[in-house]
Image: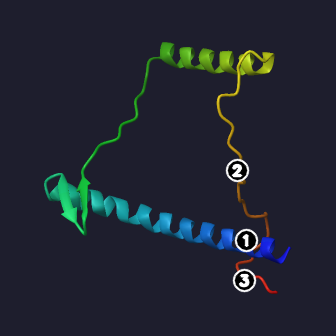
């Protein structure tokens, strides 16, 4: 069980580090976008090339939203009736903090 506790604790530590890094990246993204845009849509630095790109989201007519809802309902019904078949199955373990509990980030003992 000691190895399991160590593995779980290490997983928690890494997930917290990833979350902190992702938060820092989100802060830097707008600055990087602005800088690359100022440099002419392309920047080469530190062995990497950065390109300015645009991601768009679209608003569709109500008819399209209705079609999407119909497709979603049809898929759900096929799953319920057993018509749909599993194409891929992925096992995962989500990690969420317990409400009202401060996460333990201390190293395991033993």
Q: Residue 7, labelled with which disc?
A: 1
| Location of the C terminus (image quadrant) | bottom right
Q: Position of residue 97 (x, y in %)?
A: 73, 64
Q: What residue occupies the far right of the structure in this picture?
A: 1
Q: Is 99 on the left-hand or right-hand side of 21?
A: right
Q: Residue at x 63, y 21 (%)?
A: 72
Q: Is residue 37 above or below residue 100?
A: above
Q: Is residue 51 above or below residue 55?
A: below
Q: How busy is the neighbourhood of tag 1: few (under 14 within 10 Å), some, or many (20 plus)?
A: few
Decide if residue 103 is in sight here: no
Q: Earlier in the sequence, mark 2 or mark 1?
A: 1
Q: How busy is the neighbourhood of tag 3: few (under 14 within 10 Å), some, or many (20 plus)?
A: few
Q: How busy is the neighbourhood of tag 2: few (under 14 within 10 Å), some, or many (20 plus)?
A: few
Q: Residue 92, labelled with which disc?
A: 2
Q: Residue at x 23, y 58 (%)?
A: 49
**Of the two numbered discs 2 and 3 in the rendering, the one whose residue sits closer to the viewer:** 2
For numbered disc 2, what is the local secondary structure?
Answer: loop
Name the residue tied to disc 3: 106
């Amino acid at each position: 069980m000691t190895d399991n506790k160590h593995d779980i604790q290490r997983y928690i530590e890494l997930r917290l580090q990833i979350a902190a890094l992702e938060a820092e990246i989100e802060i830097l993204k707008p600055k990087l976008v602005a800088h690359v845009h100022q440099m002419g849509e392309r920047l080469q630095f530190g062995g990497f090339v950065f390109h300015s790109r645009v991601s768009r989201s679209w608003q569709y007519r109500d008819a399209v939203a209705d079609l999407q809802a119909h497709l979603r309902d049809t898929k759900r019904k096929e799953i319920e009736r057993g018509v749909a078949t599993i194409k891929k199955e992925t096992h995962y373990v989500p990690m969420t903090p317990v409400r009202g509990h401060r996460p333990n980030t201390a190293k395991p003992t033993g």
